[in-house]
Amino acid sequence: MINQYEVPALIEDALPELKKPLHQFPAIFHIYETVQCLDHYLIRQLRNKNYALLEKCLQLTGRLYERGNPLVRNAVTRIIVPDLSKEHPADNISRIRLYSLIPPSIYNLYMQHHLHLNTDNA
């Protein structure tokens, strides 16, 4: 089980470009800020249509959720899933591409948030 102290190292291993942002605060003591850092990067990749990096981010997110302790899972559920759900790709191809990249471990959570947001805005 992945605990909150292991998350920064896992992020750095998967996405070395986040090493500097993660070291701006003692990340091992701030799981929500650590996950927020990953979230900002993930959303930026989605908006820039950088699907290779987006896939890496989403695979890491899925692994954190799937293997994380309750605190890690909660951080993913409260930060990444809602932010990802708020993003609306401009065209159908981008939407399908995003759906195909979301790991099975968080896909249902994503869809619940996404459908809830669309129901509220209708």
Image (cartoon, grey):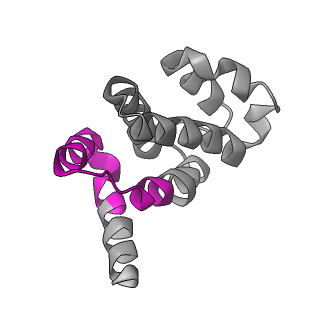
Q: Quadrant of the C terminus?
A: bottom left
Magenta extent:
81-110
For the point 40% across and 83% down, the residue is: 120
Residue occupying the point 45% across, 55% down: 81
Q: Picture quarter containing residue 78? A: bottom right
Residue 52 x %, y %: 33, 23
Location of residue 67 in the rendering, given as x and y in whole percent from the top left corner: 44, 40
Whether residue 100 appears in magenta in the rendering, the answer is yes
Q: Residue at x 17, y 51 (%)?
A: 92
Q: Is 34 on the left or on the right of 99, as rendered?
A: right
Magenta span contains residue 10: no
Magenta stretch, overall SS: helix
Q: Is residue 117 above or below residue 27?
A: below
| Of the pair 23 and 6, the residue shown nearer to us | 23
Whether 73 is drawn above or below 119: the answer is above
105 with respect to 100 (left or right): right
